[in-house]
Amino acid sequence: MSSEIRKSEIVEELKLGAIPQHVAIIMDGNGRWAQSRGKPRIFGHQKGVQSVRHVVEAAADLGIGILTLYAFSEENWGRPKAEVSALMKLLETYVIKEREKLHKGNVKFRVMGNLERVPVRTRKMVLDTQQYLEGNTGLTLNIALSYGSRNEIVYACREIARKVQSGDLTLEEVTTERFSEHLWTDGLGDPDLFIRTSGEQRVSNFLLWQIAYSELWFSQVYWPEFRKEHFYEAIRSFQSRKRRFGLVLED
Ligand code: FPP
């Protein structure tokens, strides 16, 4: 049996169970993967783009609503200049090369983060792509770029404080739901499943507010080697969990 047929069987089987509406991924291990092969870290990032393609396809096939990928954190600005520029370039190439394919696949594209720090050229390309794919109704591919969750929360607090000060909001109207509306993930809902690759078990300033009730999955696989079957494994684990959201469930 060809591996493509086998994969579509797995997809059909998984679709019989609960499919997470929103999956968030920390794509970790590019640098270590490359270095373990005697290659520069950038080589790992380049290979990582292939994994992005595989996972986007797998998520769309499964009918997942939102896929949030941590492409670049605010802390990542502190990496060597050459690595930062290579990452920006990879993002640019990805959106240019992939735009039509994403469009054909009915994929919507969104970017979130402190975009003021992103080079004008990269920013323009990702925002143009967002606009180009705006009308699509399938999977939303949400890229966290120059993203830091603590800053996201601080910005939300400032915005809310401003509204309270100007009388647009009363203190009583500041609820968890209203707070969520001021985050960059507004409208996306919280991740049901949170994946980190490379064996590290940290959250690293990613979606701190939003993952309050997410199911966590840590894969040992380095991101450049992460393939559809690894993604399916995470979904399978998700399907085996009983989510209680702090309540007591009847058996
Ligand atoms: C973490 O690995 C990965 C990143 C900081 C960058 C991820 C970017 C890509 C996969 C490519 C571009 C993205 C898209 C969406 C096209 P690391 O470098 O921290 O690895 P290490 O922990 O082994 O050093």
Image (cartoon, grey):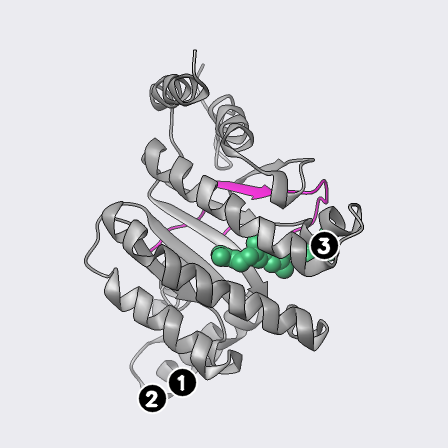
Question: Are the two marked residues, 1 and 3, in contact with CB atoms closer than 8 angstroms?
Answer: no
Disc marking residue 31: 3
Cα–Cα span, label 2 and label 1: 6 Å
Cα–Cα span, label 3 and label 2: 47 Å
Q: Amino acid at mark 2?
A: Ser
Discs 1/3, front:
3
Residue underneath mark 2? 166
Furthest toward the left, the residue is 135
Residue underneath mark 1? 162
Position of 81 with respect to 181 (left or right) is: right
Residue 208 appears in view:
no
Labels 1 and 3: the sequence-earlier one? 3
Q: Amino acid at mark 1?
A: Arg
- Is 2 drawn above or below residue 131 in the view shown? above
**Mark 2, residues whose alpha carbon is within 10 Å: few (<14), some, or many (≥20)?**
few
Disc marking residue 213: none
The part of the chain drawn in magenta is 187-211
Furthest toward the bottom, the residue is 166
Question: Are the two marked residues, 2 and 1, in contact with CB atoms closer than 8 angstroms?
Answer: yes
Question: Are the two marked residues, 3 and 2, in contact with CB atoms closer than 8 angstroms?
Answer: no
For the image, the number of numbered tags is: 3
Give x and y (percent) for residue 241.
Answer: 52, 25
State the residue at coordinates (33%, 88%): 166
162, 46: nearer the viewer: 46
Cα–Cα span, label 1 and label 3: 41 Å
Labels 3 and 2: the sequence-earlier one? 3
Quarter where residue 72 is shown: bottom right
Secondary structure of the residue carrying tag 3 is: helix
Q: Is mark 3 within 8 Å of ligand 1?
A: yes
